[in-house]
Amino acid sequence: MNSLLSLKNVETYIDQYHILQDISFEVPAGEVTVLLGRNGAGKTTTLRTIMGLNPPTKGEVAFKGAIMNGLPPHDIANKGIGYVPEDQGIFGELTVEENMKVAIKKESDDVMERMEWILNLFPDLKTFWKKPGGLLSGGQKQMLSIARAYVNETELLLIDEPSKGLAPIVVEKVMHSIQEMKQKTTIILVEQNFLMASQIGDSFYIIDDGRTVFNGRMQLLREDESLRRKYLGIA
Amino acid sequence: MELFINLTINGLATGMLIFLLAAGLTLIFGLMSVLNFAHGGLFAWGAYAGVWLYLLTNSFIAGIIGAIFMGIILGFITEKWIIQPVYGNHVQQILITLGFMIVLSEFLKVIWGPNQIAVTPPAYLTGSWEIGNILIIKYRAFIIVVGLLMYALIYYLLKHTKIGLIVRAGVINKEMVQSLGINIKRIFLYVFMAGAAMAALSGMLIAPYAGVIHGNMGMEYAILAFIVVVIGGMGNITGSILAATLVGLIGSFMAYYVPELSLAVNMLIMAVVLLVRPQGLFALKG
């Protein structure tokens, strides 16, 4: 399997709390890998561990075969990993334009092309280009956060709970855009909304109590109600 | 009326000097969440190094450049070896920076002696202009102009340059800035060095204004800078200049009418702001 990112027996502490106890998974290039699990299972910490925001204390995080343990978050991001946090991380007092400018490393033709593509995908951002990010709606903030993470040369996009707190119609919009982005980059998606995750995802890993407990192709979970009930508590 | 205008000019000049000291402090506070009590020490070292060079060369400009240079070097040393090991721990920050402030002040006395050093403005900034019955002291006008120019420069850098944009973003969400591939530690260092340079410049400019420099001047003025940072809002440069002007004006008028209460009134305002609007009177972020 052509694996872009791999985690092997990763453990992470936050202060004295042993949050990730044994996380192992592989992310194939060009696919959407979904991390599923109950609230507090360790999904968000897994993404933060990959980004170096909560560095692993044990185990191995490798991107394109190179170990990333110990690297600061900016070095990890500069390897081509974009991060869309659960709270979107919008710089509320900066305009949409300024939010994008902070993210852009170099205004090359390639970046401008990506910018054009992403703004066509999220036309709302063009409309509110000069508006402070803090005044955008929840859905628009999510779009801005995704656009900002993607605008540079991004080989892997980590997206944490993009549907959280959004109205169903907005969720559909955001999900449609992630479908579009799937054609261009590899994605790790953390999502509570199984229906949506199952539509986008190619493969899945279930995390429970800080451990990866089950994985497979998404079709398996779509078709097997007993599995869903066992691991996710849903029908 | 003349008295009112003279007190106002005096207050504005004091306000600008405090602004220069507070500008660095507010950015360091806002961006790095660092309580830097050593800031007054950097200010005092700027004053001593600048005055020493000024008296040696008889060039005020050389003194200013020397002070800024000293601020940059001390800023680098302080951030690298004093601040970096205690990021995220406010208690340790207070203790270590307060300790370093005392060390800096004592070393001043070792190098330049324990006595006050008298300083006068250069000949071209000595004297005053007389407009009607109003006397405008040249050096005070000079300080006001320098303060406003520095504000304009900082404002421009923050609003219209990429590094300024990153600093503003960093004040809001450091973690996100890192996640976008920006080395926030390096930005911290630059901001700290720039803040220290401004503190040192303020120290140099205050010397001829106060007439003397002494080893304990750091703590004396740092208190005013902290008041300004609290009133103005952390990380907010426009808030800082407005608060510094307010503090300067209150100091000037109170010193004339009720000198015993000059510092107390500013302290009282700070306490009220902390209780009623802890994010600062002019804070942009809540």
Image: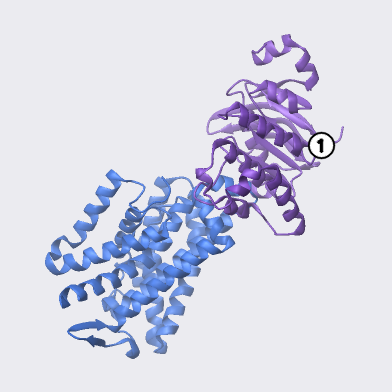
Chain colours: A purple, B blue
Chain holding disc 1: A
Q: Give residue A21's quadrant in the image.
A: top right
Residue at the spot 37% in from the left edge and 71% down from the top edge = B202
Residue A62 appears in the rendering: yes
Report which residue position mark 1 lands on. Answer: A30
Specify the farthest residue to the top.
A226
Q: Is residue B69 left or right of residue A154?
A: left
Query: As drawn, is A38 to the left or to the right of B114?
Result: right
Q: Quadrant of the N terminus of chain A?
A: top right
- Left or right: A161 as drawn, with respect to B261: right
Q: Nearer the viewer, residue A36 or B206?
A: A36
Horizontal and vertical percent position of residue A58? 67, 33
| Place of residue A65 in the rendered image (x, y in percent of width and height, measured from the top left) | 81, 41
Q: Point out residue A83 in the picture as x, y percentages from the top left corner.
A: 65, 41
Q: Looking at the rendering, which quadrant does residue B111 occupy?
A: bottom left
Quadrant assignment for the C terminus of chain A: top right
* Relative depth, front residue between A66 and B161: B161
Q: Which element type, helix, strand or loop, lies under badge 1? A: loop
The percent position of residue A169, horizontal first and vertical second, equals 62, 29
- Nearer to us in this view, A5 or B236: B236
Q: Nearer the viewer, residue B62 or B165?
A: B165
Which amino acid is tagged 1? Gly
Task: Decide if residue A161 is in sight here.
Answer: no
Which residue is at a point 56% across and 33% down the rendered structure image? Answer: A14
Tell me where residue B221 sits by quadrant: bottom left
